[in-house]
Amino acid sequence: MVGSLTSEDKGDFEHFMLKEIFDGPEALRQTLRGKIRDNKIVFSELKLEVQAINKIFIAGCGTAYHAGLVGRKAIEELAGIPVEIDLASEFAYRTALWQAGDLLIVISQSGETADTLAALYKARKAGIPILAIVNVPDSTIARLADMVIYTQAGPEISIASTKVYLTQLLVLYLLALYFAQEKNALPPEELMACINAIATIDQYVEKALTQQPRIKEIASHYYHANNAFFLGRGYDYPVAMEGALKLKETSYVHAEAYAAGELKHGPIALLNGDVLVMALLSQDALLEKTLPNINEIKSRGATIIVVCKESLQEHCQEYENRIVIPDTNPLLAPLVAVIPLQLFAYYMAIFRGTEVDNPRHLTKAVTVE
């Protein structure tokens, strides 16, 4: 259930999910508040000797896991710290080869996720320090962790997480930059450029939201689809995973995400005129590797929707179903590229007549394993 909030709490929006997608820019501003001072990333809540971190483990479920995948890439790329990431439900029951200097980061919207709690207990038993990224104050995970960063997204009512996902991403980016800053892992000018870019990322998200009418129109043509692929390379791949999850949750369309390079390793056998494919193009350096994959899909007769940056439009002109997002630093592109996927999932659900805010069989906080 959506709880005790009434329709008035949705304002002019028909559903909480749509309201929360449009709340994204303000949620990002709240998350960012106080985290940049004097051109430096500040985390007063962290009691860490960053130089002593040997390896970081990340555990989360569903959307939180997808945020963690982006965080792993950013931390390794910016700070040079090795990162392992697991689904919390798997991590809790595998042999973790802990060493001195390890850190576990657990990510949970509710702070009550049972599988993530099991991963937390595993680290506590081993004496490993735990950093929690949660949205709900005084939640169980927040109380048990050694350190907590609150995403400050505000209440999220719709079961399908949207604005909280954005804030989880932002916290992980800020952590990656903080680690890089403390380790002197980046040239000062590169670090400053990243900080400046992240300080204004809310504006790019707002611009991506202006594509709402275009996305609604595309969904109106393809809502009868029952199978969908989401494809991406690099930072686009975990965003594709999140897009597929949102489509499953809200519209009950069977959707799978693949790294674009894996297409020929099996999934291409499923392509035909009944399959919907959403391809992400936000990573400039990977464009020449991704475009041939998309062209091959086209030759197999599948319907293609392309999400591309403004600067890459010339490479996507042959695709009628094109959603354009503002030019963004490729590192931060997941914060912007996910917006069309969230809106697409929402409108697919609307046109298919599903219960958008309360999808069947799902709950907001998964408190049993």
Image (spheres, grey):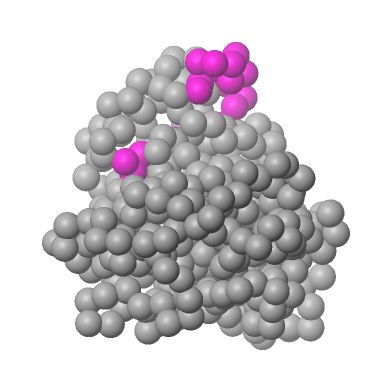
> Magenta includes 266?
yes
Task: Say left or right for 367 vs 250.
Answer: right
Q: Residue at x 59, y 27 (%)?
A: 275
- Pinpoint residue 140: horizontal percent, then vertical percent: 74, 75
Q: Residue at x 23, y 68 (%)?
A: 196
14 over 185 or under it: above or below: below
| Quadrant of the rendered image containing residue 12 | bottom right
| Quadrant of the rendered image containing residue 172 | bottom left
- Pinpoint residue 230: horizontal percent, then vertical percent: 53, 36
Q: Residue at x 35, y 78 (%)?
A: 42
Magenta segment, which residues? 262-283
Q: Quadrant of the C terminus?
A: bottom right
> Magenta includes 185?
no
Outermost residue, left side: 189
Task: Say left or right for 353 vs 293.
Answer: right
95 over 12 or under it: above or below: above
- Pinpoint residue 344: horizontal percent, then vertical percent: 54, 50
Q: Residue at x 22, y 45 (%)?
A: 311
Can the viewer see residue 339? no
